[in-house]
Amino acid sequence: MKFSFGPRFSDYFILVYAVITLYIRFKLEQEVEITTLNSLLIGAFFVIIIYVMIKVKVLNPNWFGLFNSKKSEQ
């Protein structure tokens, strides 16, 4: 049995995840005074986590309907 989330939940999960990870990175830069390069590496690690979750089909994002393949009929 494969574990996966629906498109709407996946969209909101990715949105909340991005906001939280940005907050963590900015907070770390101010409090610990890490370098910009280290902050970029941490950000890349966070992006890789989401990428892997999408590739193994745990998350199935719809990207809020931005990349809809069906054209609206008029």
Image (cartoon, helix red, strand yellow):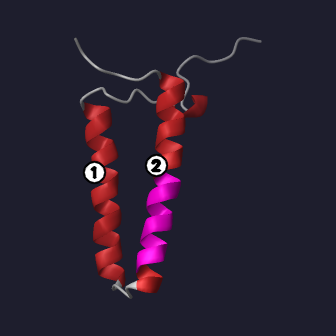
Q: Which label sits on residue 17?
A: 2
Q: Is residue 66 visible?
A: no
Vertically, is 44 above or below 30?
A: above
| Residue positioned 30% across, 26% down in the render | 57
Q: Is residue 41 visible?
A: yes
Secondary structure category for the residue under label 1: helix
**What type is the residue that disc 1 sits on?**
Ile
Choose top left, top right, bottom left or bottom right for residue 59.
Answer: top left
> In the drawing, does residue 58 fall left or right of residue 22?
left
Q: Residues within 10 Å of mark 1 (few under 14, many from 20)?
A: few
> In the drawing, does residue 4 fall left or right of residue 20?
left
| Residue positioned 30% across, 61% down in the render | 44
Choose top left, top right, bottom left or bottom right for residue 8.
Answer: top right
Label 1 belongs to which residue? 48
Which segment is the magenta one?
A: 18-28
Q: Main secondary structure of the magenta part?
A: helix
- Quarter of the N terminus within the rendering: top left
Tell me the distance, in whole angstroms, between the alpha carbons under discs 1 and 2. Answer: 12 Å
Count of numbered circles in the view = 2
**What type is the residue that disc 2 sits on?**
Tyr
Asked if residue 31 lies in the magenta stretch, the reply is no
